[in-house]
Amino acid sequence: MKFVLIGSGLAGGLLAAYLGRRGYDVDLYERRADPREGNIVGGRSINLAISTRGIHALEQIGIADEALQHAIPMRGRMIHDKSGALHFTPYDVDPKKCINSIGRAALNTTVIEAAQRYSNVRVHFNHKCTDIDLEAPTAHLETEDAKVTGHGDAVIGVDGAFSAVRKSMQLKIANFQYDESYLAHGYKELTIPPGPDGSWRMEKNALHIWPRKSFMMIALPNPDGSFTCTLFWEFEGLRSFATTQSDDDVRRFFDEEFPDAVPLMPTLLEDFRENPTGSLVTVRCAPWFYRDKVCLLGDAAHAVVPFYGQGMNAAFEDCVVLDECLEKFPDNRQRAFSEYFSRRKENADALADLAIGNFIEMRDKTASKTFRAKKKLDHLLEAALPGTYLPLYTMVTFTRIPYAQAAQRARLQDRIVYAALIATVIIIVSLLIISSHAE
Ligand SMILES: Cc1cc2nc3c(=O)[nH]c(=O)nc-3n(C[C@H](O)[C@H](O)[C@H](O)COP(=O)(O)OP(=O)(O)OC[C@H]3O[C@@H](n4cnc5c(N)ncnc54)[C@H](O)[C@@H]3O)c2cc1C
């Protein structure tokens, strides 16, 4: 059986490795040049946070150690307030539980090389897919000087949030459901270079956040001593990307909002001018497959905004689930695709909601004392009721509990905790009233 994969991004490379291991023939087509030829993965984040789900998917194919060798553990959030004061909130009651900052380009290379270890996997760079013939199924591709077709028993679109494969499904499948929604915020990447001795100029083992209510900046550490900062800010408005364009405006905005970061950012003005402003999209669609011929995976099926640090983790989890489904139905690809879709769809939808919710938490609530108190209470309850009470962040980030189940369980836990708090307050007040009457 032969699969044609479109897109050798993070999930495409990993999926090719899984399919290659299962003995399938795989032709993987990527519109960009080989990342090992110094081609920068343009327009996307330089580093990402990988956690339990993503690591599990790498472990299953035996490349977790290789991929994580240069990753930097981040044990919690380091909040920077406007005065420059710092507050650290650990991610979990167990200090060993951390998320890991990993370079996108290096991870991409690792998964592609893992795929290429299987002689039945072939990777073709500089091949842009323009259209899919769903019935054949065939991918139509363009190179610099030729038109090419990729034939297989099935085509899998792993071509990201703006998927060409999904677009073909949208055009050709009656009743294909499609919804995309953009945040009013965009993002821009900026740099904090290493110190003169190559060391990190802020706490290395933390995800840094400058929460400013309607917008925020974050920074993740890189192995070379630098940090990649990402400013999430409104595209339009009184103070926004649109109205802040001159060097003076940019400087003033940063001096007002991120005064402790400015001295660490010597290339701020150049970075701000030269780096693109990205948009943030949530994509929901259904179904993710067409008969036994075409399937979608990763961002192509369910792009989410990046605020839970789970887009790639979820895409890697898709690879594990699709592999399990192909194992379960080796002679019935349509059932395999169908089961993969039904196992993943509600979870992708739940993650999309969680990711938007976490934007509000990161940019606004992390700055508040109530938020820090709630996190402490979460950790107390988790320690007091091990295995029974699990904070939402812990379930999403440090377990493989399906996202929809995690969200549902967190809602139930919250209701019980709030009811218990209200009951406690009522009991205390009643006891006070009784004792005052007794006197
Ligand atoms: C700012 C930002 C920060 C993020 N941070 C995190 C994080 O911390 N943790 C996390 O888990 N996730 C994070 N994500 C999400 C993560 O980047 C995506 O979920 C992940 O990259 C999805 O992998 P993918 O392989 O599905 O898509 P992609 O990585 O986008 O790969 C798609 C590939 O398909 C190729 N392609 C596209 N169109 C075609 C075509 N027509 N023909 C041929 N090839 C094509 C592209 O060149 C690319 O190589 C972040 C996203 C953003 C934008």
Image (cartoon, rainbow, N blue to C red):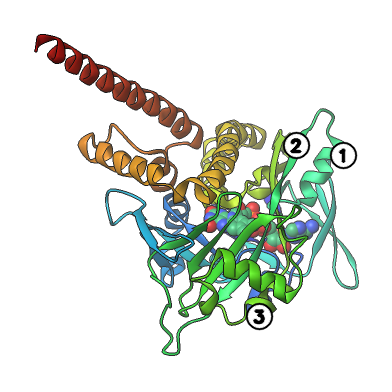
Q: Is mark 2 within 8 Å of ligand 1?
A: no
Q: Which residue is mark 3?
A: 38
The C terminus, quarter of image: top left
Give whichever of discs 2 and 3 has the lower sequence position.
3
Residue at position x 65%, y 73% from top? 251
* Callouts 2 and 1 close, C-beta under 8 Å: no
Type of amino acid under label 1: Leu
Q: Which residue is mark 2?
A: 179
x and y, in percent, of residue 146 in the image? 90, 69
Nearer to us in this view, 231 or 15: 231
Q: Which residue is mark 1?
A: 171
Against 48, is 263 above or below? below
Residue at position x 90%, y 73% from top? 145
Type of amino acid under label 3: Gly
- The answer to whether residue 281 is left or right of residue 88 is right
Q: Secondary structure at mark 1?
A: helix
